[in-house]
Image: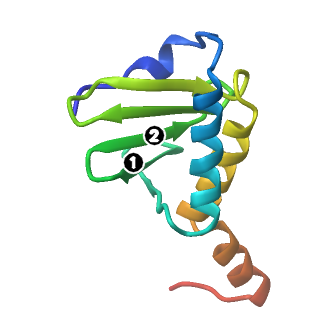
Amino acid sequence: MAKRDGWKKGLVITMPTEKDIEFVKFLFESTKQGKVQWEPTARQNEFTTSLQGKYRVFTNNPTGYPMIELWDDADQTLLNLNSIEVGVVAELYEFVRRKALNVDAVLDNLMRGERKA
């Protein structure tokens, strides 16, 4: 996979299409329903999932504004949105982060007083 340095270049604000917004909402709903599973990448606070075996979605929050990228299997960026452009990107990022890092399970364990050796 190609090196992805776009996160560090700052925000590029473009006008998302209705289809872009619809895709992010679809992704969020599919994630909430458990149809899409996310996992952490090697980068801190970045998460990824695969769609149809040939597309990768990445979400991160490098600038204080969560972002989402859709890549194809030729390492072409098909979609690059942030939460300024599409507000639901922030909701998706936070939901994904909590699920991928098992935040609720950690909190449950802490409140029950469980410790790992």
Residue at position x 20%, y 29% from top?
A: 74
Confirm whether residue 19 shows in the render: yes
Q: Residue 97: percent from the left, percent from the top? A: 60, 53
Q: Is mark 2 on a helix, strand or loop?
A: strand
Q: Would you place residue 5 above or below residue 72 in this image?
A: above
Q: Local crowd at mark 2 within 10 Å, few (<14), some, or many (≥20)? A: many
Q: Would you place residue 12 above or below residue 52 in this image?
A: above
Q: Name the residue under label 1.
A: 41
Q: Is residue 3 left or right of residue 77?
A: left
Of all residues shown, which one is farthest toward the right? 111
Q: Name the residue under label 2.
A: 58
Q: Residue 82: percent from the left, percent from the top? A: 63, 26
Say if mark 1 contacts mark 2, CB within 8 Å.
yes
Q: Would you place residue 85 above or below residue 68 in this image?
A: above
> Hey, which quadrant is residue 104 in on the image?
bottom right
| Sooner in the amino-acid sequence: mark 1 or mark 2 | 1
Q: Which mark is residue 53?
A: none
> Hey, which quadrant is residue 70 in on the image?
top left
> Hey, which quadrant is residue 66 in on the image?
top right
User: Which residue is at the front of the view, 84 or 65?
Assistant: 84
Q: What residue type is labelled 2?
A: Phe
Q: Local crowd at mark 1 within 10 Å, few (<14), some, or many (≥20)? A: some
Residue at position x 65%, y 74% from top?
A: 106
Colour mapping:
rainbow
